[in-house]
């Protein structure tokens, strides 16, 4: 790499600049530009360069002629200017390269995640403050009117005021201020705007930790102090205080003057987490996710780059922020599928967090009550360390989990709660306790069909049923966002008013709750009802305040929440996640149901969990009932190893898509014909993807399965790189896929 061959700070007259654009090719978005040696451009500097008729930002990688596409001297264009922003740290540049190479993405596409807020590259406008000129410096003829005296008295003892505030507080007009400035009584100072981020205080008292919590916290703190790379799995049962424990490591990073990054899978809905952070550190942390308002986004990016953010909590994309001195990354709920990005650069934030840690030489903590098989195996092989929390603080215990066999005690027709769950709910409500009914299905019903001919309402753009959302009065596709009204007449048999709902969603379950427990106050919690941080915070507040008796929730309520009076969790359809049958279906089901079970009995009242299932004998159900996580994971590991599946072998998914099916078939077959025949490499397919039609594009899938030691990226690059694709056909590659749709 360029940075090993050249001193970083030598003045270059030609520099290689990485543009944040999806440009393919070996240079992956890096181009040479002429540079004025006096500017002394260095690696990481963010500059503006011409590209065709546009001006775009880019990151200096090093001297020209090394990294970028070769360009003849006479065609070389000049760097236009350098942005007044700190350089992108070397660890981030190397993370960009790493991620691009791992995911087979254009480097520029990844660079775009690092400089994701172009407007933040400009320093924010300074604020103008009026301050009083000391009396000794006044002109001899300075005249003081009552209005001028009021202005001066408002300004005593303060850092200064913005003109508007000063005029208001002193009760004067702007002409008075102008006159005073002309007379040399006050002057204007231009200052950097104050940072909206307070400094977290690591030394506020935390909770008194139990012995095992102390041990875990000391281990992580020691890792932070050692300032070297390490990965530790913080493996603790739900409610065991993992958050309290990693807060200690965050505090240690702050004490060392370094920054800390905490990744959470569902940050927009994590008001409770923010509250706990504020309690421990005195201020709220900086937050990063895709729904930030533009101004906050700009301020946050800039403050991170300038090292003015002590702790940032964010979604996966926070990993690419240009932290200049990161001392710790915590990946909370590390097993969560939300860490995998499916579109564009298909990276896994947990894995790239580990890479970031090794490039930045700092520890990474992977936190979970149900560690992923990947993490479990890495601990077993000694690559990762592990610390364990085995008990809940105080008198809280893990809830008892029972399976409810739907074949033996089915719900009544058209209902979804089996009698034992109804009884348990009644008992909990009678005792004044709260109940969570978990059903991971948004809307009213997953399927709407014609009762005369069986016709199903499907999305016109996708291979998917339309989901009825009765509150909105619409049918929606959860894949492409298509939405329409329920037709009055069946297209197929022309029967009128013949469409009926099939299967439950949370809205339909709410109907049943209302019918069965008319006095209970219930609340539906899904991504449709908790659409942003404010609604999520209000939901949490109302549950904690005891204003809700029954929560009817999807996965948005499965994790993180701490509701002390919640004692019963009813899982309405335990088999739901197993249906697709992909590689991680049972692992994910175990994690999700274990996680949601962990919402019960977190305080002094014991909790109970009832899982409705058609297959109580399935290993995953047995493991949940017995609380045998390790046994389940060991069995899962054996099965995957026998099949040569990740993490024991490697997988890559290839999706060919085109507006017409024949085109997609043709290209998929062409790929198959060109497929490499290599030892340890199996290529499966092509076959129509389960989502054979998505957003109007026809999709075909191939799956590459290799032995662990095979460099799957190289296999893919050698195979797909030389192929010429017809227009309108796209081939997307997902190394280590989590979705097989
Ligand atoms: P986890 O992240 O493992 O699910 P949390 O950190 O959310 O667990 O802790 C669960 C609950 O127990 C929280 O309300 C937390 O404040 C409380 N808690 C954790 N550790 C202690 C402790 N040492 N003393 C008192 N309360 C604690
Ligand atoms: Zn659709």
Image (cartoon, helix red, strand yellow):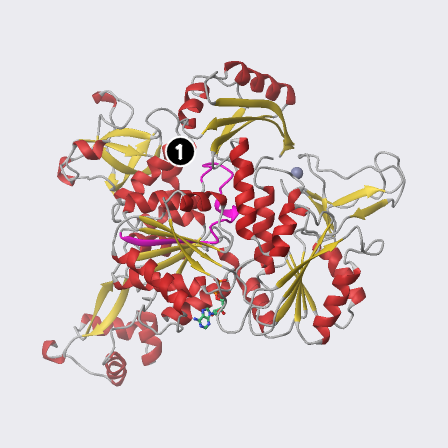
Q: Which residue is the site of mark 1?
A: 102
Query: Looking at the picture, how far across and down is residue 615, in whole percent?
Result: 72, 47
Instruction: Classify mark 1: helix, strand or loop.
Output: helix
Looking at the image, which residue sits at the far bottom? 146
Tell whether circle 1 marks a residue whose Cβ is less than 8 angstroms from ligand 1: no
Lateral position of residue 388 relative to residue 533, left or right? left
Indicate the position of residue 389 as horizontal and vertical percent values: 45, 61
Q: Nearer the viewer, residue 192 or 550?
A: 550
Q: Residue 87 occupies which quadrant of the picture?
A: top left
Q: Is residue 281 visible?
A: yes
Left or right, residue 525 beside residue 704: right
Kindly identify the residue that appears in the image at 27 percent across and 75 percent down.
176
* Residue 121 against residue 402 in the figure, above or below: above
Return the x and y of residue 590 as percentages of the image width and height: 59, 50
The answer to whether residue 556 of the structure is visible from this angle is: no
392 and 161: which is toward the camera? 392
Please name whichever residue, 31 or 27, is drawn nearer the observer in this view of the structure. 27
Residue 342 belongs to magenta span: yes
Q: Nearer the viewer, residue 392 or 3?
A: 392
Q: Eyeballing the image, is 109 above or below 627?
A: above
Label 1: how many Cα within 10 Å (few below 14, some 14–19, many 20+): some
Q: Residue at x 44, y 24 (%)?
A: 716
Q: Position of residue 509 (x, y in %)?
A: 74, 58
Q: Is residue 339 magenta?
A: yes
Q: Residue furthest top?
A: 673
User: Is residue 199 placed above or below 592 in the rendered structure?
Assistant: below
- Quadrant of the frame with the N terminus: top left
Which quadrant: the C terminus? top right
In this figure, what is the number of numbered marks?
A: 1
Question: In the drawing, does residue 693 fall left or right of residue 380?
Answer: right
The magenta-colored residue range is 325-347
């Amino acid at each position: 790499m360029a940075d090993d061959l050249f001193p970083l700070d030598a003045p270059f007259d030609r520099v290689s600049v990485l543009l944040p654009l999806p440009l393919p090719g070996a240079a992956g978005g890096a181009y040479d530009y002429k540079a004025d040696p006096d500017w002394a451009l260095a690696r990481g500097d963010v500059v503006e360069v011409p590209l065709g008729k546009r001006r775009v930002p880019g990151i200096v990688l090093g001297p020209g002629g090394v990294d970028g596409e070769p360009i003849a001297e006479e065609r070389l264009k000049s760097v236009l200017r350098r942005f007044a922003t700190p350089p992108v740290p070397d660890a981030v540049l190397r993370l960009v390269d790493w991620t691009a190479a791992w995911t087979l993405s254009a480097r520029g596409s990844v660079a775009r995640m690092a400089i994701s807020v172009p407007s933040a590259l400009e320093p924010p406008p300074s604020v103008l403050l009026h301050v009083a000129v000391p009396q000794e410096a006044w002109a001899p003829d300075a005249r003081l009117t009552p209005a001028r005296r009021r202005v001066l008295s408002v300004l005593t003892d303060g850092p200064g005021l913005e003109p508007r505030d000063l005029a208001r507080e002193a009760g004067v007009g702007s002409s008075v201020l102008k006159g005073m400035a002309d007379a040399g009584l006050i002057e204007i100072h231009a200052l950097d705007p104050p940072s909206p981020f307070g400094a977290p205080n690591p030394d506020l008292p935390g909770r008194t930790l139990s012995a095992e919590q102390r041990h875990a916290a000391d281990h992580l703190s020691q890792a932070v102090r050692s300032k070297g790379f390490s990965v530790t799995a913080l493996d603790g049962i739900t409610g065991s205080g993992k958050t309290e424990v990693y807060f200690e490591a965050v505090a240690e990073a702050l004490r060392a003057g370094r920054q800390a990054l905490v990744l959470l899978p569902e940050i927009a809905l994590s008001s409770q987490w923010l509250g706990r952070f504020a309690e421990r550190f005195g201020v709220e942390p900086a937050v990063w996710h895709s729904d930030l308002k533009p101004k906050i986004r700009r301020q946050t990016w800039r403050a991170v780059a300038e090292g003015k953010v002590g702790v940032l909590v964010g979604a996966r994309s926070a990993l690419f922020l240009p932290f200049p001195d990161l001392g710790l990354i915590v990946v909370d709920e590390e097993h969560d599928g939300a860490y995998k990005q499916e579109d564009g650069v298909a990276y896994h934030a947990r894995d790239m967090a580990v890479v970031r840690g090794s490039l930045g030489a700092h520890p990474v903590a992977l936190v979970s009550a149900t560690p992923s098989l990947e993490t479990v195996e890495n601990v077993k092989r000694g690559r990762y360390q592990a610390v364990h929390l085995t008990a809940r603080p105080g008198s809280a215990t893990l809830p008892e989990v029972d399976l409810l066999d739907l074949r033996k005690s089915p719900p009544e027709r058209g209902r979804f709660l089996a009698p034992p769950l109804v009884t348990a709910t009644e008992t909990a409500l009678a005792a004044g306790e709260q109940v969570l009914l978990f059903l991971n299905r948004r809307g009213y019903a997953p399927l709407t069909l014609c009762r005369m001919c069986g016709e199903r309402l499907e999305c016109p753009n996708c291979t998917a049923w339309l989901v009825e959302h009765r509150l909105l009065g619409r049918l929606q596709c959860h894949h492409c966002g298509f939405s329409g009204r329920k037709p009055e007449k069946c297209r197929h048999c022309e029967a009128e008013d013949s469409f009926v709902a099939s299967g439950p969603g949370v809205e339909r379950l709410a109907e049943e709750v209302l019918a069965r427990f008319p006095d209970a106050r219930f609340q539906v919690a899904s991504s449709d009802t908790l659409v942003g941080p404010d609604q999520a915070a209000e939901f949490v507040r109302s549950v904690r305040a005891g204003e809700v008796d029954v929560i009817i929730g999807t996965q948005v309520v499965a994790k993180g929440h701490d509701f002390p009076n919640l004692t019963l969790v009813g899982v309405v359809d335990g088999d739901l996640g197993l249906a697709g049958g992909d590689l991680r279906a049972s692992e994910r089901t175990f994690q999700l149901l274990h996680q949601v079970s962990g919402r019960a009995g977190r305080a002094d009242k014991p909790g109970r969990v009832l899982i409705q299932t058609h297959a109580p004998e399935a290993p995953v159900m047995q493991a949940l009932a017995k609380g045998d996580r390790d046994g389940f994971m060991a069995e899962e590991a054996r099965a995957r190893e026998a099949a040569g599946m990740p993490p024991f072998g490697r997988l890559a998914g290839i999706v060919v898509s085109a507006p017409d099916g024949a085109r997609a078939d043709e290209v998929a077959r062409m790929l198959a014909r060109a497929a490499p025949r290599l030892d340890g490499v199996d290529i499966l397919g092509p076959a129509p993807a389960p989502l054979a039609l998505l957003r109007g594009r026809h999709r075909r899938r191939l799956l590459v399965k290799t032995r662990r030691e095979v460099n799957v990226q190289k296999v893919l690059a050698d195979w797909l790189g030389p192929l010429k694709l017809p227009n309108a056909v796209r081939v997307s590659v997902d190394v280590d896929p989590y979705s097989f749709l």
